[in-house]
Amino acid sequence: MSTKSSPARALTRVSAVLGVAAVAVVFNAAIASAHVETDPGQAAPGDDATITFRVPNEETAAGVVKLEVTFPTDHPVAEARTTPIPGWTAQVASGKLATPVHQNNSDVTEAVQTVTWTANPGTQIGPGEFQRFAVLAGPMPDNTDQLLLPTVQTYSNGDIVKWDAPPPAPGAPEAEHPAPSLALVAEDKPADKPATAPTADAAASTSGSDNTARWLGGAGLVIGALGLGLGIGIVARGKRASTSSDTKTTS
């Protein structure tokens, strides 16, 4: 008694292969974007701004229990206030500047140094989770187009991750742990339509993101093509086996 290979069953196997390939591409893209970042990522010079830090847990066996953000002294921010987050204690540290900085038509002599969130006992950002930490700060400096905010992330097992790498040089890849940044854009000049040409650092950052996206897209196409080729081969073998079996049965 001969057994016929079902084309429908072969197509089911093809669908499974393609599904696994698609999941792999999406998973890799999600991992690549799991950085400590500001949201929405821009503010207006001279105004107060709500800066929200999106903090993911990148480990599988420990929780995030502390986040410390450092504010720049060359482009200082005079004041900062936090909003209550259940299970977390926030502390804003300010101090005198070694040299006053003239911005927003005045001299800034004292500014925010750090903002720190510490988890209370029993609280953490667990594996596979993220948390948002918001701070109202200002006024934003008017003597720069970008504010870098180096951040230190501490885990319950003692691991420390420093998000402090500056923007990459032109043509260089993005750093593994880039510092969160805030684009300072005038309200009448949207970030997606700048009045002047973007800086080299901004262009390099965009290039790095585009290269990553292209790499992930190319990987997805290659995996999909391999899966499709495998599926066509399976279907073809199934048809040949079916035809051969029918011929033997007829004879």
Image: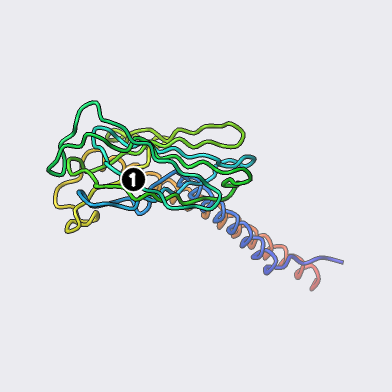
Which residue occupies the foreground of this view, 30 or 242? 30
| Residue at the extreme left of the image, as rendered | 105
> Number of numbered discs present?
1
Q: Position of residue 137 (x, y in %)?
A: 31, 47
Residue linked to disc 1: 80
Taking the spot 27% from the left edge, 33% from the top edge, the residue there is 73
The quadrant of the rendering that contains the N terminus is bottom right
Q: Quadrant of residue 102?
A: top left
| Residue at the extreme right of the image, as rendered | 1
The quadrant of the rendering that contains the C terminus is bottom right
Q: Position of residue 248 (x, y in %)?
A: 79, 67
Q: Quadrant of residue 246?
A: bottom right
Mark 1, other Cα within 10 Å: few <14 / some 14–19 / many ≥20: many
Is 83 left, or right, of 98 in this rendering?
right
Which residue occupies the foreground of this view, 193 or 117? 117
Is 64 left, or right, of 205 in this rendering?
right
Is 91 left, or right, of 182 in this rendering?
right
- In terms of secondary structure, where does tag 1 sit? strand
Query: What amino acid is labelled 1 in the image?
Result: Ala
Which residue occupies the foreground of this view, 9 or 119? 119
Q: Position of residue 11 (x, y in %)?
A: 64, 65
Above or below residue 64? Residue 7 is below
Q: Position of residue 159 (x, y in %)?
A: 56, 32
Taking the spot 70% from the left edge, 66% from the top edge, the residue there is 9
| Residue at the extreme top of the image, as rendered | 98
